[in-house]
Image (cartoon, coloured by chain):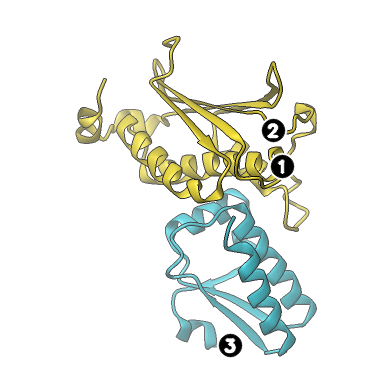
Amino acid sequence: MDREPCISIRLFSDPKLLAPIRAFVDGLSKCVGFSEKSRGLLSLAVDEALANVIRHGYGERSDGLIWLNIWRLQEPAGLRIVLEDLGRSVDPALIKGRDLADVRPGGLGVHIIKETMTESTWESRPGGGMRLTLVKLLAPHERANPSTTQSENCAK
Amino acid sequence: MSCAPAIRKAVAGVMRERPGRLIMDLSAVSYMDSSGIATLVEALQQSMRNKMKFVLVGVTPQVRSAFEITKLVSMFTMVATIDDATKD
Protein backbone atom coordinates (compact mmCIF):
# COMPACT_ATOMS: atom_id res chain seq x y z
CA MET A 1 0.00 0.00 0.00
CA ASP A 2 1.23 3.49 -0.83
CA ARG A 3 2.24 5.61 2.11
CA GLU A 4 0.23 8.57 0.82
CA PRO A 5 -3.53 8.28 0.30
CA CYS A 6 -4.74 8.61 -3.28
CA ILE A 7 -7.47 10.96 -2.09
CA SER A 8 -7.60 13.29 0.92
CA ILE A 9 -10.66 15.32 1.79
CA ARG A 10 -11.15 17.72 4.65
CA LEU A 11 -14.74 18.50 5.48
CA PHE A 12 -16.83 20.09 8.18
CA SER A 13 -19.19 18.08 10.37
CA ASP A 14 -22.20 19.32 8.42
CA PRO A 15 -24.96 16.75 7.73
CA LYS A 16 -25.61 18.47 4.40
CA LEU A 17 -22.28 17.06 3.19
CA LEU A 18 -23.32 13.44 3.76
CA ALA A 19 -25.15 13.07 0.43
CA PRO A 20 -22.28 14.40 -1.74
CA ILE A 21 -19.76 12.26 0.15
CA ARG A 22 -21.98 9.20 -0.43
CA ALA A 23 -22.07 10.00 -4.14
CA PHE A 24 -18.29 10.40 -4.19
CA VAL A 25 -17.71 7.07 -2.40
CA ASP A 26 -20.14 5.36 -4.75
CA GLY A 27 -18.28 6.69 -7.79
CA LEU A 28 -14.88 5.76 -6.43
CA SER A 29 -15.94 2.25 -5.45
CA LYS A 30 -17.40 1.78 -8.93
CA CYS A 31 -13.94 2.53 -10.32
CA VAL A 32 -12.40 -0.11 -8.07
CA GLY A 33 -14.86 -2.73 -9.32
CA PHE A 34 -17.38 -3.13 -6.51
CA SER A 35 -20.83 -4.34 -7.49
CA GLU A 36 -23.83 -2.04 -7.24
CA LYS A 37 -24.95 -3.67 -4.00
CA SER A 38 -21.45 -3.46 -2.47
CA ARG A 39 -21.21 0.19 -3.52
CA GLY A 40 -24.49 0.98 -1.80
CA LEU A 41 -23.37 -0.74 1.39
CA LEU A 42 -19.92 0.89 1.31
CA SER A 43 -21.48 4.33 0.87
CA LEU A 44 -23.89 3.53 3.70
CA ALA A 45 -21.02 2.49 6.01
CA VAL A 46 -19.06 5.70 5.33
CA ASP A 47 -22.24 7.72 5.80
CA GLU A 48 -22.89 6.00 9.14
CA ALA A 49 -19.30 6.62 10.25
CA LEU A 50 -19.53 10.32 9.38
CA ALA A 51 -22.96 10.61 11.01
CA ASN A 52 -21.55 9.09 14.20
CA VAL A 53 -18.73 11.66 14.22
CA ILE A 54 -21.22 14.49 13.67
CA ARG A 55 -23.69 13.19 16.26
CA HIS A 56 -21.43 11.83 19.00
CA GLY A 57 -18.01 13.34 18.32
CA TYR A 58 -19.13 16.89 17.68
CA GLY A 59 -22.53 16.89 19.39
CA GLU A 60 -24.21 17.86 16.09
CA ARG A 61 -22.04 20.97 15.73
CA SER A 62 -21.50 21.65 12.03
CA ASP A 63 -18.09 23.31 12.33
CA GLY A 64 -15.98 20.35 13.48
CA LEU A 65 -13.21 19.11 11.22
CA ILE A 66 -13.17 15.64 9.67
CA TRP A 67 -10.43 14.20 7.49
CA LEU A 68 -11.22 11.47 5.01
CA ASN A 69 -8.16 9.71 3.54
CA ILE A 70 -8.53 6.92 1.00
CA TRP A 71 -6.07 4.37 -0.32
CA ARG A 72 -6.77 2.08 -3.24
CA LEU A 73 -5.58 -1.43 -2.38
CA GLN A 74 -4.16 -3.66 -5.10
CA GLU A 75 -3.33 -7.12 -3.74
CA PRO A 76 -5.99 -7.90 -2.67
CA ALA A 77 -8.02 -5.22 -4.40
CA GLY A 78 -10.21 -2.88 -2.40
CA LEU A 79 -10.32 0.39 -0.53
CA ARG A 80 -8.88 1.55 2.77
CA ILE A 81 -10.70 4.57 4.19
CA VAL A 82 -9.49 6.40 7.27
CA LEU A 83 -11.70 8.97 9.00
CA GLU A 84 -10.17 11.23 11.64
CA ASP A 85 -11.76 13.92 13.76
CA LEU A 86 -11.03 16.19 16.68
CA GLY A 87 -14.31 15.54 18.46
CA ARG A 88 -15.06 13.87 21.75
CA SER A 89 -12.85 10.85 22.25
CA VAL A 90 -14.41 7.65 23.52
CA ASP A 91 -12.95 4.36 24.66
CA PRO A 92 -12.88 2.21 21.50
CA ALA A 93 -13.86 -0.79 23.64
CA LEU A 94 -17.20 0.92 24.29
CA ILE A 95 -18.06 1.22 20.59
CA LYS A 96 -20.38 -1.70 19.98
CA GLY A 97 -23.27 -2.50 17.73
CA ARG A 98 -26.39 -3.66 19.46
CA ASP A 99 -27.66 -7.21 19.83
CA LEU A 100 -29.93 -7.63 16.83
CA ALA A 101 -32.16 -10.04 18.72
CA ASP A 102 -33.16 -7.03 20.79
CA VAL A 103 -35.43 -5.21 18.34
CA ARG A 104 -35.17 -1.56 19.17
CA PRO A 105 -33.88 1.58 17.53
CA GLY A 106 -30.33 2.75 18.25
CA GLY A 107 -26.89 1.20 17.86
CA LEU A 108 -27.59 0.22 14.28
CA GLY A 109 -24.92 2.42 12.72
CA VAL A 110 -21.96 0.58 14.26
CA HIS A 111 -23.57 -2.74 13.38
CA ILE A 112 -23.96 -1.64 9.75
CA ILE A 113 -20.30 -0.58 9.60
CA LYS A 114 -19.06 -3.86 11.09
CA GLU A 115 -21.27 -6.01 8.88
CA THR A 116 -20.48 -4.10 5.70
CA MET A 117 -16.73 -3.66 5.94
CA THR A 118 -14.01 -6.32 5.74
CA GLU A 119 -12.29 -4.55 8.66
CA SER A 120 -13.33 -1.70 10.93
CA THR A 121 -11.09 -0.39 13.70
CA TRP A 122 -11.78 2.50 16.04
CA GLU A 123 -8.93 4.05 18.01
CA SER A 124 -8.21 7.21 19.92
CA ARG A 125 -6.29 9.68 17.80
CA PRO A 126 -3.01 11.04 19.14
CA GLY A 127 -3.70 14.70 19.83
CA GLY A 128 -7.40 14.15 20.44
CA GLY A 129 -10.43 12.87 18.61
CA MET A 130 -10.94 9.50 17.02
CA ARG A 131 -9.63 7.55 14.06
CA LEU A 132 -11.72 4.96 12.25
CA THR A 133 -10.03 2.70 9.72
CA LEU A 134 -12.31 0.94 7.26
CA VAL A 135 -11.17 -1.68 4.77
CA LYS A 136 -13.37 -3.22 2.14
CA LEU A 137 -11.98 -5.83 -0.23
CA LEU A 138 -13.59 -6.98 -3.44
CA ALA A 139 -15.64 -10.15 -3.04
CA PRO A 140 -14.50 -13.16 -5.13
CA HIS A 141 -17.29 -12.65 -7.66
CA GLU A 142 -16.31 -8.99 -8.03
CA ARG A 143 -12.67 -9.94 -8.61
CA ALA A 144 -13.74 -12.57 -11.14
CA ASN A 145 -16.01 -10.18 -13.02
CA PRO A 146 -14.45 -6.74 -12.75
CA SER A 147 -16.43 -3.91 -14.23
CA THR A 148 -13.66 -3.50 -16.80
CA THR A 149 -15.02 -0.40 -18.43
CA GLN A 150 -15.30 1.40 -15.15
CA SER A 151 -11.84 0.30 -14.02
CA GLU A 152 -10.31 1.47 -17.27
CA ASN A 153 -11.92 4.85 -16.81
CA CYS A 154 -10.26 5.35 -13.44
CA ALA A 155 -6.91 7.00 -13.14
CA LYS A 156 -4.24 4.62 -11.94
CA MET B 1 -30.09 11.55 9.49
CA SER B 2 -31.77 14.84 8.58
CA CYS B 3 -35.27 13.50 7.78
CA ALA B 4 -35.77 11.19 10.76
CA PRO B 5 -37.16 13.80 13.21
CA ALA B 6 -39.75 15.01 10.67
CA ILE B 7 -40.85 11.44 9.90
CA ARG B 8 -41.08 10.62 13.61
CA LYS B 9 -43.30 13.68 14.13
CA ALA B 10 -45.51 12.79 11.16
CA VAL B 11 -45.92 9.21 12.35
CA ALA B 12 -46.82 10.40 15.86
CA GLY B 13 -49.53 12.61 14.37
CA VAL B 14 -51.03 9.74 12.40
CA MET B 15 -50.86 7.41 15.41
CA ARG B 16 -52.97 9.79 17.46
CA GLU B 17 -55.81 9.26 15.01
CA ARG B 18 -55.66 5.52 15.76
CA PRO B 19 -56.14 4.24 12.21
CA GLY B 20 -56.42 0.49 11.76
CA ARG B 21 -53.51 0.46 9.35
CA LEU B 22 -50.49 2.63 8.73
CA ILE B 23 -49.15 2.47 5.17
CA MET B 24 -45.82 4.11 4.44
CA ASP B 25 -44.96 4.59 0.76
CA LEU B 26 -41.17 4.39 0.39
CA SER B 27 -41.11 4.13 -3.40
CA ALA B 28 -39.47 7.56 -3.72
CA VAL B 29 -36.91 6.86 -1.00
CA SER B 30 -33.63 5.96 -2.69
CA TYR B 31 -31.49 6.00 0.45
CA MET B 32 -32.02 5.23 4.13
CA ASP B 33 -29.48 5.22 6.93
CA SER B 34 -29.64 3.75 10.43
CA SER B 35 -31.57 6.71 11.83
CA GLY B 36 -34.26 6.14 9.20
CA ILE B 37 -34.42 2.45 10.01
CA ALA B 38 -34.56 3.25 13.73
CA THR B 39 -37.48 5.60 13.07
CA LEU B 40 -39.35 2.83 11.26
CA VAL B 41 -38.59 0.38 14.08
CA GLU B 42 -40.14 2.88 16.50
CA ALA B 43 -43.18 3.23 14.25
CA LEU B 44 -43.51 -0.55 14.03
CA GLN B 45 -43.37 -0.89 17.79
CA GLN B 46 -45.97 1.86 18.27
CA SER B 47 -48.27 0.24 15.73
CA MET B 48 -47.93 -3.13 17.48
CA ARG B 49 -48.81 -1.54 20.83
CA ASN B 50 -51.83 0.13 19.22
CA LYS B 51 -52.81 -3.11 17.44
CA MET B 52 -52.40 -1.45 14.05
CA LYS B 53 -51.03 -2.97 10.88
CA PHE B 54 -47.88 -1.28 9.61
CA VAL B 55 -47.05 -1.82 5.95
CA LEU B 56 -44.12 -0.53 3.90
CA VAL B 57 -44.76 -0.02 0.18
CA GLY B 58 -42.33 0.10 -2.74
CA VAL B 59 -39.12 -0.52 -0.81
CA THR B 60 -36.23 0.20 -3.19
CA PRO B 61 -33.21 -2.16 -3.45
CA GLN B 62 -30.87 0.16 -1.52
CA VAL B 63 -33.33 0.56 1.32
CA ARG B 64 -33.98 -3.18 1.38
CA SER B 65 -30.20 -3.79 1.60
CA ALA B 66 -30.07 -1.57 4.69
CA PHE B 67 -32.89 -3.58 6.28
CA GLU B 68 -31.17 -6.83 5.33
CA ILE B 69 -27.81 -5.85 6.83
CA THR B 70 -29.53 -4.97 10.09
CA LYS B 71 -31.43 -8.27 9.93
CA LEU B 72 -34.71 -6.41 10.39
CA VAL B 73 -36.26 -7.21 7.03
CA SER B 74 -38.40 -10.02 8.43
CA MET B 75 -39.89 -7.74 11.09
CA PHE B 76 -41.68 -5.59 8.52
CA THR B 77 -44.47 -6.24 6.07
CA MET B 78 -43.23 -5.05 2.68
CA VAL B 79 -45.41 -5.01 -0.42
CA ALA B 80 -45.07 -3.64 -3.94
CA THR B 81 -48.09 -1.35 -4.27
CA ILE B 82 -50.56 0.67 -2.22
CA ASP B 83 -53.28 -1.69 -3.47
CA ASP B 84 -51.38 -4.62 -2.01
CA ALA B 85 -51.04 -2.76 1.27
CA THR B 86 -54.78 -2.24 1.62
CA LYS B 87 -55.54 -5.94 1.24
CA ASP B 88 -55.95 -8.08 4.32
Q: Looking at the image, is A59 positioned above or below residue B10? A: above
Residue assigned mark 3:
B88
Amino acid type, callout 3:
Asp
Chain A, hue in figure? yellow
Residue B20 placement, left or right of B81 = right
Classify residue A130 by image quadrant.
top right
Chain B, hue in figure? cyan
The image's mark for residue A87 is 2
Q: Are marks 1 and 2 in contact (CB under 8 Å)?
A: yes
Taking the spot 54% from the left edge, 41% from the top edge, the residue there is A45
Cα distance between the residues tagged 1 and 3: 42 Å
Cα distance between the residues tagged 2 and 3: 50 Å
Tell us which disc is closer to us: 2 or 3. Answer: 2
Tell us which disc is closer to us: 1 or 2. Answer: 2
Image quarter in which the N terminus of chain A is found: top left
Amino acid type, callout 2:
Gly
Residue assigned mark 1:
A56
Q: Are marks 1 and 3 in contact (CB under 8 Å)?
A: no
Task: Report the front residue among B59 and A66.
Answer: A66
